[in-house]
Image: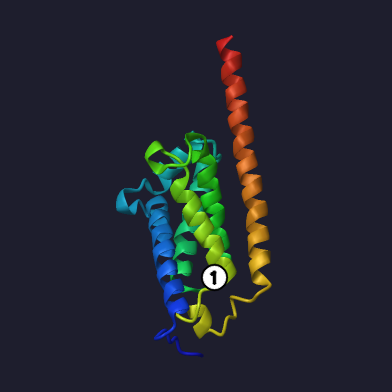
């Protein structure tokens, strides 16, 4: 196993800081969803929220989002399986962006600013790799091969498209149902 050495490598230190910031933030959001930590709703509260914004079934989507953010964020911070971690967290942030997009860009208006930045940073880390200050480097990039990047991003992109389309279809059905009952 290769040792992790970071001294004197600006790029590697920069990637480490980026991974810790983005991965740590995502891991904290996942912990809110899964365990109710940091003021989060836990599985039940998150499931209720997911249902309220059209992601059904709520419990399944709460667990999926919590695992993608919590697990993916932790792996990003550690620099382990970086292509898959970055893709998983980017997919979750795409789902969050679908919810907040109608409110505009800025977070103070409830917009998609945070989810977009975290999603783009996740993709950037998946593409760039974790750098030398990472477990991927220590394990000789066994889980960070070049072919893994497009594979992970394509799989996540396809899954995210299916989930967001199902959400949009459900919301459209609810709207049509509500319109029909008010006539």
**Residue nearest the observer in this picture, 104 or 45:** 104
Residue 69 screen position, x and y as percent: 47, 57
Query: Viewed as shown, does residue 99 lie left or right of 29?
Result: right
- In the displayed structure, 17 sits above or below 5; it is above
What residue is at 55 percent from the left and 64 percent from the top? Answer: 124
What residue is at 37 percent from the left and 52 percent from the top? Answer: 32
What residue is at 56 percent from the left and 19 percent from the top? Answer: 178
**Residue nearest the observer in this picture, 130 or 52:** 130
Residue 109 screen position, x and y as percent: 40, 37
Residue at the outermost left position? 39
Q: Quadrant of the C terminus?
A: top right
Q: Residue 89: tell me if it is visible.
A: no
- In the displayed structure, 48 sits above or below 145; it is above
Q: Determine the image quadrant of residue 14.
A: bottom left
Residue 103 screen position, x and y as percent: 47, 35
- Residue named by callout 1: 82
Element type at mark 1? helix
Query: Viewed as shown, does residue 85 lie left or right of 172?
Result: left
- In the displayed structure, 5 sits above or below 76; it is below
């Amino acid at each position: 196993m290769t040792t992790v050495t970071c001294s004197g490598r600006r790029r590697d230190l920069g990637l480490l800081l980026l991974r810790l910031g983005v991965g740590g933030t995502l891991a904290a959001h996942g912990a809110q969803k899964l365990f109710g930590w940091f003021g989060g709703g836990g599985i039940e509260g998150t499931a209720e929220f997911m249902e309220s914004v059209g992601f059904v079934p709520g419990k399944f989507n709460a667990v999926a989002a919590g695992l993608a953010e919590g697990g993916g964020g932790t792996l990003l911070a550690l620099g382990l399986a970086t292509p898959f971690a970055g893709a998983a967290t980017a997919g979750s942030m795409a789902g969050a962006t679908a919810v907040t997009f109608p409110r505009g860009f800025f977070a103070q208006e409830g917009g998609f600013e945070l989810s977009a930045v975290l999603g783009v940073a996740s993709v950037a880390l998946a593409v760039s790799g974790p750098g030398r200050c990472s477990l991927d480097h220590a394990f000789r990039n066994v889980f960070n091969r070049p072919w893994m990047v497009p594979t992970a991003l394509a799989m996540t992109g396809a899954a995210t498209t299916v989930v967001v389309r199902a959400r949009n279809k459900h919301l459209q059905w609810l709207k049509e149902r509500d319109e029909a009952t008010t006539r």
